[in-house]
Image (tube, helix red, strand yellow):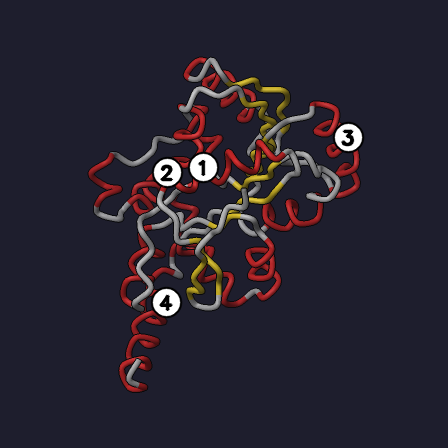
Amino acid sequence: MTFMTPRIRLLKTPIDALSLEEAVARVQQLVAQGQGGMVCTPDTTALWRAQQDPALRAIYEEADLVTPDGTGVVWASRVLGMALPERVSGIDLLERLFACGRTLRLFLLGAAPGVAEQAALKLAERYPNLRIVGTHHGYFRPEENEQMIALIDQAQPDVVLVGLGVPRQERWMQENRAKLRKSVLMGVGGCFDVWAGRLMRAPVSWRRLGLEWLYRLIQEPKRVARVSTIPLFVLEVWALKLLYLIMGR
């Protein structure tokens, strides 16, 4: 049965209008089909970057699933009258998927040396149904990519979690999905650091207030340049809303 994904276009970028449970079901379907796939989870800053980078936006167009990994993305959809059901962050999507209890073969690619291995150990402790079939850090050179593909292909994972940061992880997935055609590739940003215990995820109260980005900024001040685009994003959304009102939309 074909899974019909309702998709909106937010600031020219496609986002799937699914709940967390529906997104989990979509990933499960992609895994069950055994024909690969690509899952992207852009947050507010990634959505802003996509406005400036048509190549990144084209990757989102090609993805099998694009979820709103950011309270700001959901807020923007509601301001502009598109109303995404809820935030579907990459980490929430994966942890709900893992908790379903189905056996999954995972390969973790990304983060600093040693982080993916530590994350794999922690995940295996929490979710006995997971089979971590391989890990590798994200500091590999372009000329080493074919070796990386061979390593992943030999491990035969159901899902490859790619934590290389935006937009590198999206470009890597697009360039290599045909070579890993049986695996679902999913961009996960900084999830490995959280699972490994190097970073703490924001408390639920912060997440409900839409301040998870601030909590992470406190832990990683070097991200200030990245999150500085958030006010620009907000201004663009309000400017577009004003244009809609003028046009009577």
Identified by mark 1, the residue type is Ala
Identified by mark 2, the residue type is Glu
Q: Earlier in the sequence, mark 2 or mark 4?
A: 2
Residue drawn at (61%, 42%) of the image: 37
Q: Quadrant of the N terminus?
A: top right
Q: Residues within 10 Å of mark 1 (few under 14, many from 20)?
A: some
**Residue 124 shown left or right of residue 241 in the figure:** right
Q: Gap between marks 1 and 3, in whole Å?
A: 29 Å
Tell me, for residue 25, which label it has, or none.
Answer: 1
Mark 2 lies on a secondary structure that is helix
Residue annotated with mark 4: 232
Residue annotated with mark 2: 21
The reply to whether discs 1 and 3 touch (Cβ–Cβ < 8 Å) is no
Q: Earlier in the sequence, mark 2 or mark 3?
A: 2
Q: Earlier in the sequence, mark 1 or mark 3?
A: 1
Q: Residues within 10 Å of mark 3 (few under 14, many from 20)?
A: few
Q: Residues within 10 Å of mark 4 (few under 14, many from 20)?
A: few
**Residue 37 shown left or right of residue 248 in the figure:** right
Identified by mark 3, the residue type is Ala
Expressed as whole percent of the image width and height from the top left, the position of residue 217 reads 35, 45
The reply to whether discs 2 and 1 touch (Cβ–Cβ < 8 Å) is yes
Q: Gap between marks 2 and 3, in whole Å?
A: 33 Å
Label total for image:
4
> Quadrant of residue 136 in the image?
top right
The reply to whether discs 3 and 4 touch (Cβ–Cβ < 8 Å) is no
Identified by mark 4, the residue type is Leu
